[in-house]
Amino acid sequence: MQGIVYDATKIKVCQAFYEICDYAELSREWADALWKDILSKGQIYEELIYYIEHHTFMDKLKVCGYTLCDLYVWQMNRYNLIKDTGKNSRTCNKEKMAMQAFRTMADLMANPDEGIKKLDYGQGMDKL
């Protein structure tokens, strides 16, 4: 077995990802589905590594004009609308918003037309 190099990076990323999901109080099924999608999309995986290491988005990936930071802000706006506060309170779980931004990005990559509809018209607000 000499000469075998073992890289545990993916295992460490997986552990960190599930720790974030646990902290965000996301279900195991939800986290499993997102992890599977992240592994199948290398660009999102790269963004996740950066997020874990720096606790901010790299924003290298752009899909249909949206970056993870854009999707994070969209999640925050949804949260504020649902909570009817108009502002971001301390009760808002920022890690949950970040993981939901990753979920939205994976969905956007898988189905751009539906994703754009959701982002542009998904707030349930009347358009003038």
Image (tube, rainbow, N blue to C red):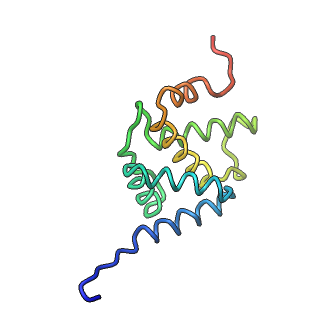
Q: Is residue 13 above or below residue 29?
A: below
Q: Residue at x 55, y 45 (%)?
A: 103
Instruction: Give the position of the C terminus as an image quadrant.
Output: top right
Q: Is residue 125 left or right of residue 7?
A: right
On screen, residue 3 versus residue 125, left or right, reads left
Residue 2 vertical placement versus 10 (above, below)? below
Asked if residue 6 is positioned above or below residue 88 in the image, the reply reads: below
Please, which residue is most extreme toward the bottom here?
A: 2
Residue 110 vs residue 104, the one in the foreground: 110
> Where residue 66 sits in the image (x, y, percent)?
44, 35
- Horizontal side of 93 relative to 18 (left or right) equals right
Q: Which residue occupies the extreme front position in the image?
A: 1
Where is residue 45 shown, x and y percent of the image? 42, 55
**Which residue is painted at 41% across and 36% down in the image?**
63
Residue 4, position as x, y percentages in the image? 28, 82
- Identify the residue shown where x is 51% and y is 54%: 36
Estimate the x, y position of residue 23 in percent, counting from the top left.
65, 63
In terms of image quadrants, where is residue 32?
bottom right
Quadrant of the rendered structure where residue 31 is? Answer: bottom right
The extreme top residue here reads 128
Which quarter of the rendering shows the N terminus?
Answer: bottom left
**Vertical placement of residue 15 versus 101, above or below:** below
Q: Nearer the viewer, residue 45 or 76?
A: 45
Q: Can you name the residue that lies furthest to the right here?
A: 84
Count of numbered marks: 0
Question: Residue at the location (39% across, 70% down)?
Answer: 9
